[in-house]
Image (cartoon, rainbow, N blue to C red):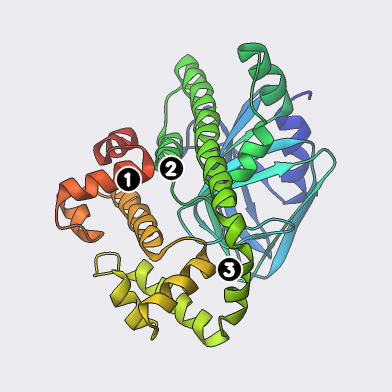
Amino acid sequence: MQSIKHDLYDTTFAQCDMEVVQDTDSYNSEGCLYRFQNKQGFGEYWAYFRDNLFAVNVFNLHFHTAGSMCYRHTEHLCIAYYEQTDLVIQGLPSPQGSHVIGTYVADEGGEYVARFDAGAVTCATSITISPDYYRRYLLNRFGSIPDIRRMFSLVNGCRNCPALVALFKRIREYRGTGIAAELFFEGAVAEAVGLVINQAEKIDREQRRSRRTGQGANHLKASFKQRISADDARSLEETEAYIRRSPSACLDCQTLAQRACMGQTKFKEAFRSHYGCPPATFVRRIRMERASELLSDTDLPIQQIAKEVGYAKPSAFTAAFSKTTGLLPSDLRDSTY
């Protein structure tokens, strides 16, 4: 790769009517700021480029009308923290919504197609790395590395990565210049790849364990899933919405089963079949996602955050948060500032 800017970004920016501007007051001055405004929408895209190795990006795009972005690309990997995204990326399970990690594993000569409706928004901080980084640079540095492309694929859509979220927020807010900026962005990219590997290994272990424990029950689960009616599926999705809306409420199995108008046994089996985990595991995951957002985005005391996500005792919240994320609540908050 000649340079990541030349080989990956310049043509794409031209196709999307993005023009470089000098006003970078709201962003780090070491990068380049691009703006676009046409009949489809408007927005800004900031990028910091490092030779043929990586780019760090911050973007906020709004679309007036429905349409799509399409372009051919060279091989690369991208990981983003989406504060909000309404884009649907062709061929991928798109991480729509808010506060979600999304990845894109791009093949040489592949086509990126992102579709959007009128009023769609995408706001994110991202890192793009080239094959020269993850094949040559990392290999020369460490001698042996895991399959980085597979690692990136595994974390797509992850909503339980507080350390990655904190890193992307630091990147978005960083304003250093000169050699300090070079060292910061180089370290941030390395940290991101390390966190991806760590999270992907956890997901891989869980998937292998799930396959081992689930093989004997596959036929039974498939049979049960076929018996879930459309009404039951709708009840489960309404229950999920309630869990996300009310993390501080009593969310034990009895309460949730009553809301879904099911007996507890049927509810547990239907929930596991529909979501791939027990209700209690799902509830804890949603509560920790909300806690991560509050720790990162607010100054609320940890004791208050514990109550906001359904824990009367801060010690119980700390134990649950640590078990789920591998971090103490105070560690996540400290890493955000």
- Could you tell me which secondary element the residue under label 3 belongs to? helix
Q: Tell me whether the residue at label 2 lies in contact with that at label 3, contact meaning CB atoms closer than 8 angstroms.
A: no
212 vs 57: above or below: below
Toward the front, the furthest residue is: 216
Q: What residue type is labelled 3?
A: Lys
Toward the right, the furthest residue is: 109
- Could you tell me which secondary element the residue under label 1 belongs to? helix
Eye-nearest disc, 2 or 3: 3
Which circle's residue, 1 or 2, is located before the other in the chain?
2
Identify the image quadrant of residue 126.
top right
Q: Which amino acid does label 2 sit on?
A: Val
Q: Can residue 301 be seen in this view?
A: no
Q: How crowded is mark 1: few (under 14 residues within 10 Å), some or many (20 or more)?
A: many
Q: Residue at x 51, y 65 (%)?
A: 275
Q: Mark 1 points at which residue?
A: 296
Q: Mark 3 points at which residue?
A: 221
**Which residue is nearer to you in this view: 126 or 174?**
126
Q: Can residue 187 be seen in this view?
A: yes
Q: Name the residue under label 2.
A: 165
Which circle's residue, 2 or 3, is located before the other in the chain?
2
Q: Tell me whether the residue at label 1 lies in contact with that at label 2, contact meaning CB atoms closer than 8 angstroms.
A: yes
Q: What residue type is labelled 1?
A: Ser
**Which residue is nearer to you in this view: 250 or 141?**
250
17 vs 77: above or below: below
Q: Tell me whether the residue at label 1 lies in contact with that at label 3, contact meaning CB atoms closer than 8 angstroms.
A: no
Which circle's residue, 1 or 3, is located before the other in the chain?
3
- Could you tell me which secondary element the residue under label 2 belongs to? helix
Locate residue 118, reporting x and y percent. Answer: 62, 71
